[in-house]
Image: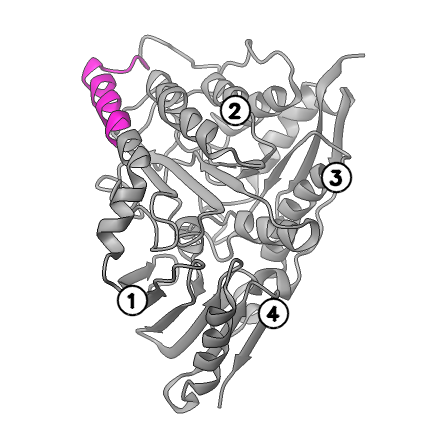
Amino acid sequence: MLKAKNRLGLVFFPAFDWAISPTHPEREERLLYTQDQIFEEGINDIEGIKFYNPNIASNKDIERVHFCVPSVEDRATTSHMISAGGAIKAAEAVMEGEADKAFALVRPPGHHAQRVVYGDRGFCIINIEAIMLENLRARYGHRRVAIIDTDCHHGDGTQDIYWNDSDTLFISFHQDGRTLYPGTGFIDEFGGPGAIGYNINVPLPPGTGQEGFLYVLDNLVLPILDEYKPELIVNSAGQDNHYTDPLTNMNFTAWGYAELNHRLNPDIAVLEGGYSIEGALPYVNLGIILAMAGLDYSHVREPDYDPAKLKQPQKITEYIKELCETIYKRWRNKESIAQEIIKGKEEIIRKRNVYYDTDGIMEYQTQRFKVCNKCSGVNMIESTSDRGMPIFAVTIPQDACPSCIDEGYKIYKEADAQNYFRIYLQDRKNDIFFKRHL
């Protein structure tokens, strides 16, 4: 019997009862074809690969990460709670020592879900990686973690959640936001005052192929990880960079995804996007599973694979090399960049409009981050949507100093309920969540 070199935990959840519409790209067939491919290849018979049923995330799991308006119950369906619970189960298998690595093949996805949630954006309502990570930290102790987002779309939700957290390095390489939803993910999006430099975006030109993705990994991502020294690496494993994906414009392959995963060597992978249901996902997922298990993936090929058609143009190669050099210099100079940004300031204000494309909701948001020389600093969000429901939210960070803890509670208690539909307090230091309203 074939034996995996790495004990690998797999969690499947295709969410049979949830879809935006019967023909929407984000539907259950995304995983059903993968499931058929895995059984056809005999993955379930390999010693050392174990299948797990997902957990169900709790409201508290969601509230560690999000301010759901008006509540978790009003925003997240049972399928969303199980999808997040599937990621939690994958992490649990690794943390309990039952598996060396784990891959959560779950839907609906989550990396566009930001701190505030009014509805569905980019097919996402709750951020399953962040929910998984904060559950892990609450149960097993705080960990220094790197999240590497390889989805073709910028992981703007994960960026927002960890914008001011230097213990969570977020790196997203994706198709340039000038050419693709959500229109963000540029190199100057570098993190909040407590974590400047720990949010890294690599916007890649349309047409980037295998050569470009692996160059970014080898010459930018891996050197930064070597310097950051995370205790855990999480791959936000979107698969829509594939050359057959109907929503994007990249030229990555199933073998390339497997090779990227092998070189990145993540502890946990969580499926995100990928909408070529028959042409890509079964092969990409198979390649990632083999790579994580430490098995041979060299023969993973799509039926229509043609390397000549997928060759990356030289001008793209040169552009990516220059881009990586620029971003790496910014990483090495992050302390001096931070000093310039926060010098003489008591707070940093970040104003944003956030569009929920699936639900047609526009959010108007102001974030305020206190500049504190002892911790990441208490921060506040004032937000409303074009459908009303104004909120005020306070977050006390995990590394909060006593002064910022006291200030956070004081701000929460003194906020005037007459002005807001909901007022929230997220005390990440003590794992406490409060909300109040008229």
Give x and y (percent) for residue 76: 55, 63
Q: Residue at x 35, y 16 (%)?
A: 211
Read off the residue under disc 1. Answer: 346
Mark-to-mark CA distance, 3 and 1: 48 Å
> In the picture provided, is 410 more to the left or to the right than 5?
left
Q: Which mark is residue 52?
A: 3
Mark-to-mark CA distance, 3 and 2: 21 Å
Q: Is residue 67 above or below residue 220?
A: below
**Between marks 1 and 4 in the image, the one whose residue lies nearer the viewer:** 1
Read off the residue under disc 2. Answer: 261
Examine the structure image and report whether residue 325 is included in the region drawn in magenta: yes
Identity, as a three-letter code, of the amino acid under mark 3: Tyr
Identity, as a three-letter code, of the amino acid under mark 1: Glu
Mark-to-mark CA distance, 4 and 3: 30 Å
Q: Which mark is residue 123?
A: none
Read off the residue under disc 4. Answer: 432
Check whether the beta carbons of the residues at disc 2 and disc 4 lie within 8 A of each other: no
Which comes sooner in the sequence, label 1 or label 4?
Answer: 1
Give x and y (percent) for residue 434: 56, 76
